[in-house]
Amino acid sequence: MKAATIGFPEESRRRLEFPFFFLKGRLPALSTCQVSWRMLPGVTLTTVDRECFEAALAEARKGLEAGGVPVGAALQRDGGLVAVGHNERVQRNDPIAHGEMACLRNAGRLTSYEGTTLYTTLSPCEMCTGAVLLFGIKRLVVGEATTFAGNLNAFKERGVEVILLDDARCKDLMAEFQKRCPDVWAEDIGEAPSAEAERVI
Ligand SMILES: [Zn+2]
């Protein structure tokens, strides 16, 4: 599947000021940063969307620094960040600790997911897709679907709004990881590891 058309209008650079969310005492205040945005034609994001997506990307980078799979996620409701999380499959030796799952776990029990948006740096796998559909999250912002396509149509078929950003930073992060750790990546998406990796496991 061709994940997205590439061919951006000129790159726009803007400064986002966001000392914004103080969430349930669990999250640090987000720092001010300069962000370069390359938007797909027709994609519009609110300031809150951009800030939350940056929070997800920061989580992905945190995961890579810790030696894990660089996928990050954030959950937003009513303009506030509910939780963030990143893939900790390697770090925790936990096969279900994908970025989206970690974020949902960090959010704790919610009686309803109405009005929430989930931001993820990578198109979700089948497990995370199932969680989004199960909990009735109706809006999804995806960093990229090039290095892993997932099945974004599954969301659309169930009435979930999907916004695909085709973010170069997410693609670079994941491409670098896939090149560096192909066996860990294969494991993450349920593909057979190489014979060499199997011997180690
Ligand atoms: Zn997943």
Image (spheres, helix red, strand yellow):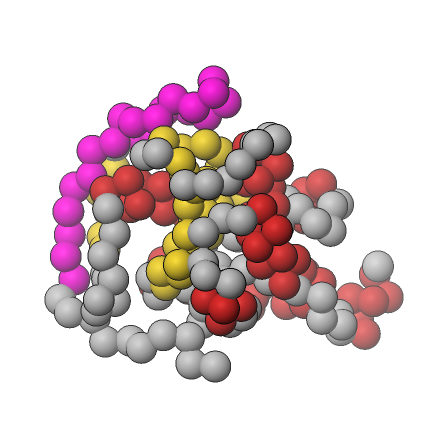
Q: Does 19 sit left or right of 61 as displayed?
A: left
Along the line of sight, the residue nearer the viewer: 173 or 18: 18
In the rendered image of this protein, does residue 166 appear above or below residue 45? below
How many labels sit on residues?
0
Residue 187, position in %: x, y? Answer: 71, 63
**Residue 64 versus residue 151: which sits nearer the camera?**
151
- Which image quarter holds the C terminus? bottom right
Looking at this view, is 174 or 16 the one in front?
A: 16
Corner quadrant of residue 177: bottom right
Residue 150 within the segment the image draws in magenta: no
Answer yes or no: is residue 181 visible. no
Q: Give the residues drawn in magenta, as a range.
A: 11-31
* Residue 193: x %, y % from top left: 75, 70
Q: Could you tell me residue 151's position as x and y percent?
A: 54, 70
Give left or right: position of 97 versus 17: right
The residue located at (32%, 34%) in the rendering is 79
Q: Quadrant of the rendered structure where residue 181 is?
A: bottom right
| Position of 94 relative to 6 (above/below) | above
The residue located at (37%, 63%) in the rendering is 164
Residue at (29% x, 46% y) in the render = 50
